[in-house]
């Protein structure tokens, strides 16, 4: 899969994405990540890409032409117009489902804004998706773009060494991931749940499923409306939610 990130700070993007799992996937050829410096497409001798907005107001606005020319350089090189994601607080909230959807693409362009934003005319011309990583404002679009590349990349076949890793993580089926434990068996007076050392795979999976539902109810109850639950789990969940003491109610059969 190929990512093309249009940015004013290419070093920031590449330094952050050339490490760990993503970096190894790039070296192995599963991913191609390229940062395109929008300043390289400025016709100003000082490589200026911003100007005052019409109508007044605080701050500066990124101009349309450098952004368009940077986008066009990618389109001409790959021979098609791929999906172009503009990372902005005004966009739809990025989610695991969105990551899976974008992972089906062969090429994706991510556009990073700065200053007070980007001239609306070029957004209308090139952007296919408006995405946000949360209801807050950052200095620029680089950090959100890196977050999206990381999440999307994990859904690309071959990026994760364990075939199940990408399908058993938090938010899969709109449930949070179950708690996990490693050695030693007892640490700081806390023991690993006995079921995890039983070797009984069916019971372990049942326990993990129960813990995922419990944790989602405790920490992200909003996700449960869209969670993929069996009829029994829905009834048990209603019982647990109405009890007030999850540790007791969750043992109901």
Image (cartoon, rainbow, N blue to C red):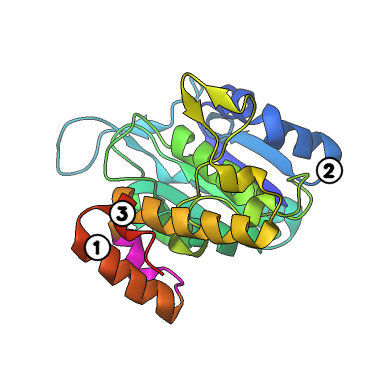
The residue tagged 2 is 29
User: Residue 43, position in %: x, y?
Assistant: 52, 32
Toward the viewer: 7 or 95? Answer: 95
Toward the viewer: 16 or 7? Answer: 16
Quadrant of image for the C terminus: bottom left
Q: Earlier in the sequence, mark 3 or mark 2?
A: 2
Quadrant position of residue 26: top right
Q: Earlier in the sequence, mark 2 or mark 1?
A: 2
Q: Which residues are magenta?
A: 222-229
The residue tagged 1 is 241
Q: Residue 248: which numbered mark, if any?
A: 3
User: Residue 180, position in %: x, y?
Assistant: 56, 40
Residue at figure coordinates x 83%, y 43% from the top left: 29
Q: Secondary structure at mark 3?
A: helix
Q: CA distance from mark 2 to mark 1?
A: 47 Å
User: Residue 184, position in %: x, y?
Assistant: 63, 24
């Amino acid at each position: 899969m190929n990512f093309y990130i249009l940015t004013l700070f290419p070093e920031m993007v590449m330094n952050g994405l050339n490490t760990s799992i993503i970096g190894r996937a790039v070296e192995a050829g599963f991913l191609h990540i390229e940062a395109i410096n929008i300043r390289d497409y400025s016709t100003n001798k000082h490589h200026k890409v911003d100007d005052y907005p019409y109508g007044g107001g605080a701050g500066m606005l990124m101009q349309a032409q450098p952004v368009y020319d940077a986008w066009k350089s990618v389109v001409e090189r790959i021979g098609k117009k791929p999906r172009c994601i503009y990372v902005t607080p005004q966009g739809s909230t990025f989610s695991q489902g969105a990551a899976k959807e974008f992972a089906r693409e062969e090429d994706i362009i991510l556009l990073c804004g700065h200053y007070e934003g980007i001239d609306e005319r070029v957004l209308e011309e090139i952007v296919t998706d408006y995405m946000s990583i949360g209801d807050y404002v950052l200095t620029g679009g680089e950090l959100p773009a890196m977050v999206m590349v990381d999440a999307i990349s994990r859904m690309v076949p071959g990026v994760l060494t364990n075939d199940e890793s990408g399908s058993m993580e938090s938010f899969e089926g709109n449930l949070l991931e179950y708690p996990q434990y490693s050695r030693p068996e007892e640490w700081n007076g806390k023991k690993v749940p006995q079921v995890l050392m039983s070797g009984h795979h069916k019971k372990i999976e049942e326990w993990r499923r129960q813990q995922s539902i419990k944790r989602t109810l405790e920490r992200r109850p909003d996700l449960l409306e869209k969670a993929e639950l069996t009829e029994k789990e829905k009834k048990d969940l209603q019982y647990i939610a109405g009890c007030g003491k999850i540790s007791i109610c969750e043992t109901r059969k």
